[in-house]
Image (spheres, rainbow, N blue to C red):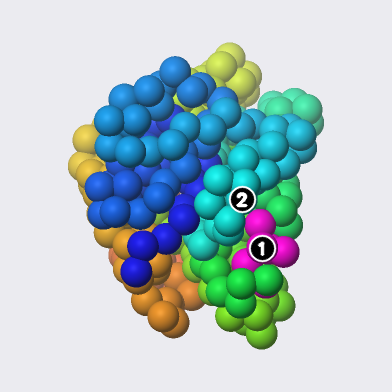
């Protein structure tokens, strides 16, 4: 069955691939982002382009009203917009930390609030929150990014139990390593924030190794296929994971004591 789908963060990476492939599957797809010029190539696949900033309330309201006016409803919301603010907790300005939470958590939460009345009215809908394996464990220098994904996981669990009564599904997707511009931007940010502080030597080692490991990352289609499964299922799983090391990391985090997990993680990155 074809759906009306809104995807945030559709200007690059996984979001852009989701928009392209889901539109090619025959769904009516709205791709939303601030950088609309980077989505121009999606028009050839039938993706409808929306200018939207998930930190701007008026922008989100306008986007939802545009979709509902044109389509009558929204079947699927994919909260994909996000970024990684990296740096030692001591070094990251609180203003940066607030912005990280604003984009990754409050933006997704507010957009969810805006679509829920329409989903409740029609008695169906699917909200897909793109989290990360980093929503289940936290490595050094990614504290605020991990905090945002831990929060998104918790909000998703609460929301799932609240809206099940209305026929609405809530799904969390937890990518591991996936090819995108995300890693290089996050590591550039890490060195900018902590490269010249007492944390610099370790920060540089971690940056070098994360970028090296990223060569093994999976193609975005791995995550697109998980989204396809979640959309197609009448009763989807509450969580899906995929991408480089995703299954192994989640398994180790589940069974290992904290300090043992820390040692294994640091050994891979140093």
Check contact, mark 1 vs mark 2: CB within 8 A.
yes
Q: Quick check: 80 left or right of 99?
A: left
Q: Residue at x 27, y 59 (%)?
A: 225
Q: Is residue 189 visible?
A: yes
Look at the image and tell me in which quarter the C terminus lies: top left
- Image spot of residue 221 (x, y percent): 25, 49
Q: Position of residue 234 (x, y in %)?
A: 41, 80
- In the image, the segment drawn in magenta is 115-120
> Residue 45: image x %, image y %?
28, 37
- Secondary structure character of the magenta stretch overall: helix
Q: Residues within 10 Å of mark 2 (few under 14, many from 20)?
A: some
User: 124 or 89, which lies in front?
Assistant: 124
Q: Which residue is mark 2?
A: 68
Q: Nearer the viewer, residue 84 or 70?
A: 70
Instruction: Give the vertical position of 257 relative to 71 (above or below).
Output: below
Q: Give the quadrant of residue 118.
A: bottom right
The residue identified by callout 1 is 118
Q: Residue at x 59, y 23 (%)?
A: 194
Q: Is residue 232 above or below residue 144?
A: below
Foreground pick, 174 / 197? 174
Determine the secondary structure under disc 2: helix
């Amino acid at each position: 069955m074809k759906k009306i789908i809104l995807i945030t963060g559709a200007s690059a990476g996984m979001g852009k691939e989701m928009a392209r492939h889901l539109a090619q599957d025959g769904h009516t797809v709205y791709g939303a982002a601030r950088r609309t010029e980077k989505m121009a190539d999606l028009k050839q696949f039938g993706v409808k382009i929306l200018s939207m900033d998930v930190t701007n309330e008026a922008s989100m309201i306008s986007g939802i009203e545009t979709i509902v006016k044109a389509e009558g409803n929204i079947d699927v919301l994919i909260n994909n917009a996000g970024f990684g603010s990296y740096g030692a907790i001591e070094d990251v300005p609180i203003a940066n930390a607030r912005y990280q939470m604003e984009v990754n958590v409050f933006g997704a939460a507010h957009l969810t609030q805006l679509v829920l009345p329409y989903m409740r009215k029609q008695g169906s809908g699917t909200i897909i929150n793109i989290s990360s394996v980093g929503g289940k464990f936290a490595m050094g220098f990614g504290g605020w990014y991990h905090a945002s994904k831990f929060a998104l996981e918790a909000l998703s669990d609460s929301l799932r139990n609240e809206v099940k009564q209305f026929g609405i599904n809530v799904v969390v997707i937890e990518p591991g390593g996936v090819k995108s511009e995300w890693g290089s931007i996050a590591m550039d940010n890490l060195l900018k924030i902590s490269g010249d502080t007492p944390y610099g030597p370790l920060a540089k080692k971690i940056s070098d190794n994360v970028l090296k490991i990223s060569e093994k990352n999976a193609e975005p289609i791995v995550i697109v296929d998980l989204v396809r499964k979640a959309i197609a299922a009448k009763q989807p799983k509450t969580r899906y994971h995929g991408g480089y090391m995703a299954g192994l990391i989640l398994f180790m985090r589940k069974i290992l004591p904290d300090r043992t997990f820390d040692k294994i993680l640091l050994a891979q990155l140093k």
